[in-house]
Image (cartoon, rainbow, N blue to C red):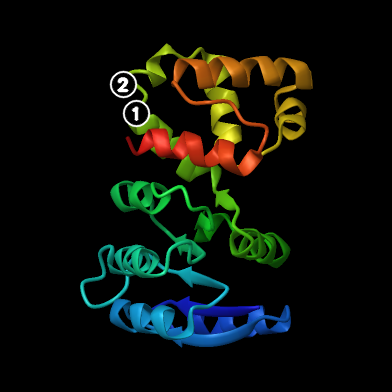
Amino acid sequence: MRLVIAEDLFLLRDGLVRLLEAHGFEIAAAVDSAPGLLHALLEHKPDAAVVDVRLPPTFTDDGLRAAIEARRQVPGLPVLVLSQYVEQLYARELLADQAGGVGYLLKDRVFNDDRFVDAIRAVAGGGTVMDPEVVSKLLGRRARDEPIARLTAREREVLELMAEGRSNSAIAQRLFISEKAVGKHSTSIFTKLDLAPSNDDNRRVLAVLAFLNS
């Protein structure tokens, strides 16, 4: 599996290269700026990209904007954002096209390499991987808006776990309720949000995130 890495800090960039090569990934390019990232993504069209949000030249949201532009030119190009920050505006835009193959992890919450590698493989396979903190902030921003406000507290808990990509079974275990109850909550959520229910976990996540971008 071929990857492009974008990280401006040398030690972290070099560490990512060594870590991922040790897990069998091929590093097509490791860059330190947003222009370099866009060029590498369009040239190599990797199986996935690991992208920091704040890259040169402005150190604001250049990395995320470069990834979004690359996905415009190469639809569905898998991108895993690895950042210290939740950039809500561009995070929602990244997730808005419903093409899948996206992820957003916070650096200080990646606790082991196995989880990180699994996240990359999931994104490369077209899945959606979201850190719970990112999900919480994206949902929280809309907490007072309709129709999110129509959800019960339990439905919001289910929605947050759903948006993390968890299956009904995993949600049931996390909330200590039955899988049948999760199914009922899910149906109610989709009804209230005017979204068609689906048994496909990835499509459910994308539908929820598309709503958050509406």
Quadrant in which the C terminus is drawn? top left
Q: Which residue is mark 2?
A: 145
Disc 1 is placed on an element classified as loop
Q: Which residue is mark 1?
A: 142
Where does residue 165 sit, x and y in percent of width and height? 62, 42
Disc 2 is placed on an element classified as loop
Res 193 visible: yes
Few, some or many C-alpha atoms within 10 Å of disc 1 (few <14, some 14-19, many ≥20)? some
Is the C-beta separation of discs 1 and 2 under 8 Å?
Answer: yes
**Residue occupying image coordinates x 58% and y 85%:** 27
- Which residue type carries mark 2? Asp
**Residue occupying image coordinates x 49% and y 87%:** 29
Where does residue 86 sit, x and y in percent of width and height? 38, 51
Quadrant of the rendered structure where residue 164 is? top right
Q: Is residue 162 left or right of residue 82?
A: right
Quadrant in which the N terminus is drawn? bottom right
Rendered view: 130 above or below 194: below
Rendered view: 16 above or below 154: below
Rendered view: 206 above or below 122: above
**Residue occupying image coordinates x 65% and y 39%:** 201
Q: Is residue 193 left or right of residue 69?
A: right
- Which residue type carries mark 1? Arg
**Residue occupying image coordinates x 73% and y 78%:** 23
In-front residue for pair 118/75? 75
Where does residue 112 sit, x and y in percent of width and height? 69, 62
